[in-house]
Image (cartoon, rainbow, N blue to C red):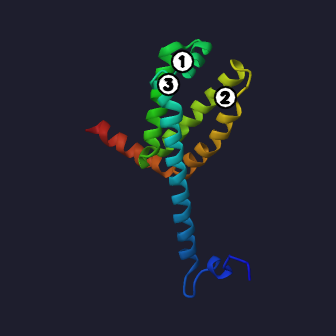
């Protein structure tokens, strides 16, 4: 037999309940989202924010073309780095994802208007995982709101 899958592995074990299977699926989904968050955080910290923060010539040239110059480049780089860090903090992950959706919408508009859509697909593609993370981690928003309210009272 050359088949490598085990159909019995996809079914709950004897004595296991449907809630056990749902719990396993939930843990797998949580782990997959966590891996996605880490990968996106690494991408934005190193491949996107870092070139802006060290004023790499390609980043500087792009921001000069946009008309934002060094100030805009450093601001966007700092926002991307802050968002990348926030993606890794559970209570901030949903809010950071929503912020990245907004940033990607701005990047898409900039790509279309200024650069004739040359790299417009990248921000559109990145909106999908950020929206997924924002939705899946939405329960953290209530927790964050409680923390902010508690701090405001203190």
**Real-space Cα separation, disc 1 to disc 2, in angstroms:** 18 Å
User: x, y percentage for residue 102?
Assistant: 58, 32
**The residue tagged with tag 1: helix, strand or loop?**
helix
Using the numbered discs, state the Cα–Cα distance from disc 3 to disc 2 in whole angstroms.
18 Å
For residue 52, the mark is: 3
Residue drawn at the location 44% of the way across and 41% of the way down: 86
Q: Is residue 3 left or right of residue 101?
A: right
Q: Which residue is mark 1?
A: 60
- Pinpoint residue 36: horizontal percent, then vertical percent: 55, 50
Query: Mark 1 or mark 2: which comes first in sequence?
Result: 1
Of callouts 1 and 3, the N-terminal one: 3
Select label 1 or label 2 by which is in front. Answer: 1
Q: Residue at x 60, y 48 (%)?
A: 132
Q: Could you say whether the residue bearing mark 3 is in a helix, strand or loop?
A: helix
Q: How many marks?
A: 3
Q: Which residue is mark 2?
A: 108
Residue in the image at 53% along x and 32% along y: 48
Instruction: Decide which of 18, 51 is in the foreground and name it.
Output: 51
User: Are the two marked residues, 1 and 2, in contact with CB atoms closer than 8 angstroms?
Assistant: no
């Amino acid at each position: 037999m050359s088949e490598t899958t085990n159909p019995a592995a996809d079914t709950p074990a004897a004595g296991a309940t449907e809630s056990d299977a749902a719990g396993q699926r939930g843990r797998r989904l949580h782990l997959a989202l966590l891996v996605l968050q880490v990968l996106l955080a690494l991408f934005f910290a190193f491949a996107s924010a870092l070139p802006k923060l060290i004023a790499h010539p390609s980043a500087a040239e792009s921001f000069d073309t946009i008309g934002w110059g060094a100030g805009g480049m450093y601001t966007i780089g700092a926002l991307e780095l802050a968002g990348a860090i926030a993606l890794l903090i559970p209570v901030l992950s949903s809010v950071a994802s929503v912020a990245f959706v907004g940033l990607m919408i701005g990047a898409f508009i900039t790509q279309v208007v200024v650069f004739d859509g040359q790299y417009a697909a990248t921000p559109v593609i990145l909106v999908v995982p950020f929206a997924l993370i924002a939705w899946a981690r939405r329960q953290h928003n209530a927790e964050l709101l409680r923390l902010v309210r508690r701090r405001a009272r203190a």
